[in-house]
Structures are given as C-alpha cells and as structure tokens.
Image: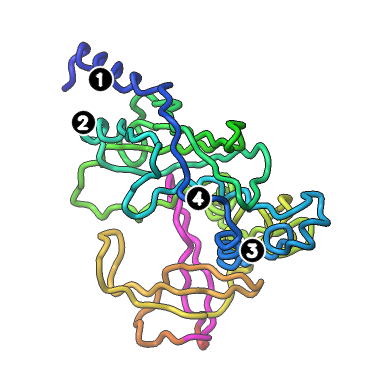
Amino acid sequence: MMTELESKSWSAELQGYVGGRGGSVYAWDSVNEAMIRQWCEVFDVDFPPFTDEQEAAQSVHGGLIAPATLLPIWLMPGLRNRRPSGSDGADPRAVMKVLEREGYIGILGTNCDQEYERPLRPGERISCIHSVEAISEEKQTRMGPGHFVTFLQEFFDEAGAKVGAMRLRILRFKPKQKTSTRPSPPQPAINQDSAFFWQGLKSGQLLIQRCKACGLLRHPPGPACTECHSLEWDAVASTGRGSLFSFVVVHQPKNPAFDYPLPVGLIELEEGTRLVAPIKCADTVTLRTGMRMEAIIEPVEGEDRLPWFRPVSGS
C-alpha cells in the first residue's frame, strides 16, 4: 500500500513531464509523390489533386497536395528508430518508462485527433515538436487501474509556420489479476468513427455506415467516404444475413476466452459489405465458402464484442 507521502511524490513525478516541449525533430524525406501514390493505392482513393498534376493545377488547390492524414507519417523514424542529423535526441515518451517501472505495464491506444492548418505539397520538408500535454490521475478502468497520457505533436514547415497537430491518448494500466473463471473476450478499441457500430450491437442491431452524399455502404467505419470523400454519413441496419466469403480455423495461439478450434470468417453481407467475425458451428469440417450465414448478436452487460455468425440450416 502506497503511503500518502509516496502518493504525492509519485504524482509530482508524473506531472513533472507535463508541458515540457522538446526540440525539433526533422523528417527523413520531403513530402513526395511516390508515397502519396502508394497511399492512394492502398486505400483505393482516386482523388485527382493527390496524383494528377494537370487536374490538380485546375482545382482549387492549384497543384498537387498530400492527403491530410499522412501528416504524422512524414515524421516516422523507421524500423531502427533513428532521426536525421540535427533532430532532438530526447525520448519523447520517457514518461512511459516511468509508468512501466511502477507496474503500469499494459498499454492501450484510446484515441487520436489530428488538426490540419493547410494541405502539404510535394517538395516540402516538415518537422515536429513533441510534448506531453496531460497525464490523468489514476483511473479505475475495465482493463485495470491506470493513467491516461496525452501526447502532442506539432508540425511545422521549413519557414516555421504550423501546418498541423496530432494528439495521441494512451492508457497505461496495471492488468487485473487473473481469476479461475473464464475471462471476457478481448474488448475492441472504440473511437468516434466506430462507436455507433458497437452501440448498435448492444441494442441488437448490426449497423453499416452509409455515405449521405452518394449512398455508398462501407465497413470498417471511417470518417470519410472512399468514393466521393464526403464527411456526412448515417447508418442502416443489416439483415444479419450473408454468405461465407472465406474463413480460417484458429488452433494456436489460444486465448482463454474462446473455445478451440476457433473458426473465424469473412462474411459478405446481403447489403454488399464484408466483416470479420467468429463462427459458431458444431464441426468446422462442414464449413465451406459460399454457404449461407446469419448473425447471432448476444449483448453482454458492460462489454462490447463482435457478432458471431452461424451457418443457416440446410445451406
């Protein structure tokens, strides 16, 4: 048991990390068309101002621009965690080692917010400054007691003008002691884009995100339509029926919350979207691609979980 004096000292040590700003950290590479093109291919984005120089010149942007969400990617250090010459060498997340020292060994990213001042253009080379914006007092969470740490990254162009910012909030927690009873299934990381999906499951509905502008249904949920880039959306309820597009049967490694072998399928819903979910069946040998499936939504008090699917009798 920590004494009151020790508790105050520990709290002061944590809060000592708040507000201090490091020096500039520089990007290895300039904003470049190759990375932008690869990003567009991975996410199946066809937006002329990102890749078509002629159409970009005629757009409101007056030339090529980079996708806004690539902002922190330009500053990634790489697998060897090295920075270009002149970058601040201090560890921007030193507070995490302090939390780990005190037993907060669990880590969970909770949310990430980005702000954009203007679009970046190919050829620009940006830098950033790291800081710890806030550390909460100890909170009792579903994962165990822990502290929420908010990291702030501010991004600047070569002239020193701010071009954006990113706040990453992370929970460092002390895992709960294991019990002899079966643990709950791993809980999903819920953000502002996906919260409606999990809330729908709690009310017995399987919801699909729909673009208000073009009507495109999409899953997993996201902030913008991949077809027309609209930010306006609502949700429609799925019938929960579909077919088994593909599947795997998991044998190892085992999670004590599940029975094994554990079949996991990629379900193609009648509405056209697909989602990954576990399958309930008497014998995994009977599974085959194309067979009809139906959702089983079993809300559990205080928990968020994926729906299960089962083969439709006679399919």
- Amino acid bearing label 2: Glu
Where residue 130 sits: x, y (%)? Answer: 44, 33
Quickly name the residue at label 4.
73
Quickly name the residue at label 2.
102
Residue lying at 71% horizontally and 50% vertically, measured from the top left: 231
Residue lying at 61% horizontally and 70% vertically, measured from the top left: 273
Magenta-colored stretch includes residue 301:
yes
Who is closer to the viewer here, 287 or 204?
Answer: 287
Q: Is residue 133 left or right of 283 when viewed as pictured? A: right
Res. 161 mark: none
Dominant secondary structure of the magenta stretch? Answer: loop
Quickly name the residue at label 3.
218
Secondary structure at badge 3 equals: strand
Residue stretch rendered in magenta on the structure:
289-312
**Can you tell which of label 3 and label 2 is closer to the viewer?**
2
Quickly name the residue at label 1.
10
Residue lying at 21% horizontally and 31% vertically, measured from the top left: 102
**Is the residue marked by circle 3 packed among few (<14), some (14-19), or many (20+) residues within 10 Å?**
many
For marks 1 and 2 on the same chain, the one whose residue lies earlier in the sequence: 1
Q: Residue 115, relative to residue 210: is it above or below? A: above
- CA gap between label 1 and label 2 equals 9 Å
- CA gap between label 3 and label 4 equals 25 Å
Q: Are marks 3 and 4 in contact (CB under 8 Å)?
A: no
